[in-house]
Image (cartoon, rainbow, N blue to C red):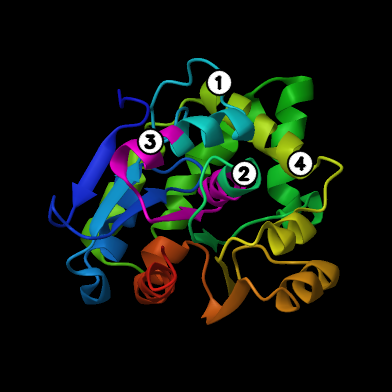
Amino acid sequence: MREAWELLISGPADADRTVLLLPGGANAARSFDLVMAEPVLSGVRLVATTLPGMAGAPASGDVSIPALARRAGEMAEELGCDVVAGFSHGASVALEMVLAGHFHGPVVLLGISLTTEDEAAFFRAVVRGSQKVGRWPLAAMLRLMPVMVRSAKTPDRHKRELVEDLKQNRTRDSLRVCADYLDYIAADRDFAAELATSGSPAWVVHAEKGDGGLTDAERATLQAAPNVTLVTIPGSVFLLPDEAPQHTAAAIADALTHAG
């Protein structure tokens, strides 16, 4: 069984810059392996962490986005992080770190959903259905996820690691984490406007198709914000750190140039 907040670290211990990497739902720290190996980030200390309830890590305590953001903020301070990058669920944690004042540097938000409308309807239905009729719909989805990952455009070795980690997920823990996440993005808040007025440099990265998206209103708000850079990756990409590590690393490298 994986530990919560386990760390995977690459790069020199005495590096001038450090980045905290927060994986997407159901994934472990090593889902950022390919990003960490990108040459553009050589010389940077990269610290990926497995979040509670993910890939077999225990979901003890509060696993809501605000609670995870508080702990991740403490970790970022302890590690001396200059940039935080998160994918999907991890991106929501990174966003809340900024909005709640737990982190004051640049953030890279990969495949983030800022509202319920941005998130996949199938995923929402499975989670909310599991809250009503029992955990079996989510259990079925978790069993299918390794099958879906086998078709991902990523090296075979990395693909095998992703599948291994996905198989470690426990339905009960996943339901807690996913339900809290959906509650967070369903809150009566304008996250795009909050990010735009936060003043924190932010990179919001999406693919043309596959990883969710932004509403027209959200996109307009972020495009008008001087502190936000929108990045659109061509084509269909579902797992940004795994299928588009070069684009992901480039956004992180760009963010590092804006770190204090």
For the N terminus, the image quarter is top left
- Distance, label 1 to label 3, CA atoms, is 26 Å
Q: Who comes first in sequence, dot 4 or dot 2?
A: 2
Label 2 sits on a secondary structure element that is: helix
| Mark 2 neighbour class, 10 Å CA radius: few under 14, some 14 to 19, many 20 or more | many
Q: In this view, does 90 lie above or below 251?
A: above
Q: How far apart are marks 4 and 1 (CA)?
A: 16 Å
Q: Which disc is residue 125 wearing?
A: 4
Q: Nearer the viewer, residue 100 or 52?
A: 100
Residue 247 placed where, x, y %? 41, 76
Q: Where is residue 107 in the image (x, y as percent from the top left)?
A: 51, 59
* Region of the chain picked out in magenta, as a range: 74-95
Specify which label sits upstream in the sequence, 2 or 3. Answer: 3
Give me the residue at 52% from left, 15% from top: 61
Q: In this image, 6 relative to 146: left or right?
A: left
Residue extending furthest toward the front: 260
> Alpha-carbon distance for marks 4 and 3?
33 Å
Per the rendering, the mark at residue 172 is 1
